[in-house]
Image (spheres, rainbow, N blue to C red):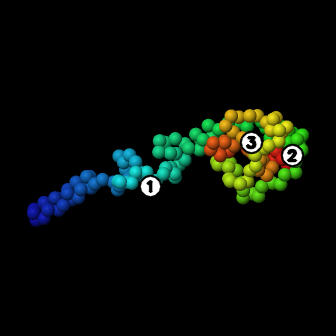
Amino acid sequence: MKGLQTLVTLLVTSLFVIAAHAAPPEGKGPHHKHAGEHAGHPGKGNSGKGQGGRDRDGHHRDRDILESLVDAGITAAIAREYARGAGFTGYAELPPGIRKNLQRGKPLPPGIAKKVHSGAFLDRLPRHPGYEWRTAGTELILVSVVTGVIADILYNVFD
């Protein structure tokens, strides 16, 4: 009986030792620095999305983008006055599905906006280096020339 008790104690102890030395699955656990990088495949795997809006360094991507954008520097009401004075009225609204894709800090969807070319109207709008004014439906949009990201949207300017 004493031999059986010793054997059971030895088995239970060995199970605890094995569990204590076991490593978490690959890519899991606090000591794995680059969870998305697998051996021989750097950069593959989780690109950082799904991390609560944070990148690998813990920064909030959307907030960082929004903070780096400029403000239009004009209200929609004043821009509407300028547009009416230049004869830009009666534009059709964008379809709801396309309009909801216009968001500050997001890329301008391709093919829906036109550059503002009118001298009288454009000359009255604030100028921001690296940005240009575009129209989409009844909206006036300030867009980064380099990235195509929407910096600001003035709604119902051309109604």
Which class describes the residues within 10 Å of circle 1: few (<14), some (14-19), or many (20+)?
Answer: few
Residue 31: in sight, yes or no? yes
Amino acid beneath label 1: Gly
Quadrant in the rendering for residue 61 = top right
Location of residue 149 in the rendering, given as x and y in whole percent from the top left corner: 65, 45
As measured in the structure, the alpha-carbon distance from the residue carrying label 2 to the one carrying label 3 is 14 Å
Is 54 drawn above or below residue 46 in the view shown?
Answer: above
Quadrant in the rendering for residue 130 = top right
- In the image, which disc is placed on residue 133? 3
First in sequence, mark 1 or 2: give its number.
Answer: 1
Whether the residues at callouts 3 and 1 have beta carbons within 8 Å, the answer is no
Residue occupied by mark 2:
88
Residue in front for this viewpoint, 79 or 21: 79
Residue in front for this viewpoint, 19 or 81: 81
- Kindly identify the residue that appears in the image at 82 percent across and 45 percent down: 157
Query: Viewed as shown, does residue 17 lie left or right of 53?
Result: left
Whether the residues at callouts 2 and 3 have beta carbons within 8 Å, the answer is no
- Kindly identify the residue that appears in the image at 13 percent across and 60 percent down: 6
Which class describes the residues within 10 Å of circle 2: few (<14), some (14-19), or many (20+)?
Answer: some
Amino acid beneath label 3: Trp
Query: Viewed as shown, does residue 108 lie left or right of 27?
Result: right
Element at label 2:
loop
Location of residue 55 in the rendering, given as x and y in whole percent from the top left corner: 50, 45
As measured in the structure, the alpha-carbon distance from the residue carrying label 1 to the one carrying label 2 is 49 Å
Residue in front for this viewpoint, 57 or 92: 92
Residue occupied by mark 1:
45
As measured in the structure, the alpha-carbon distance from the residue carrying label 3 to the one carrying label 1 is 38 Å
- Kindly identify the residue that appears in the image at 82 percent across and 42 percent down: 118
Which class describes the residues within 10 Å of circle 3: few (<14), some (14-19), or many (20+)?
Answer: many
Location of residue 112 in the rendering, given as x and y in whole percent from the top left corner: 73, 54
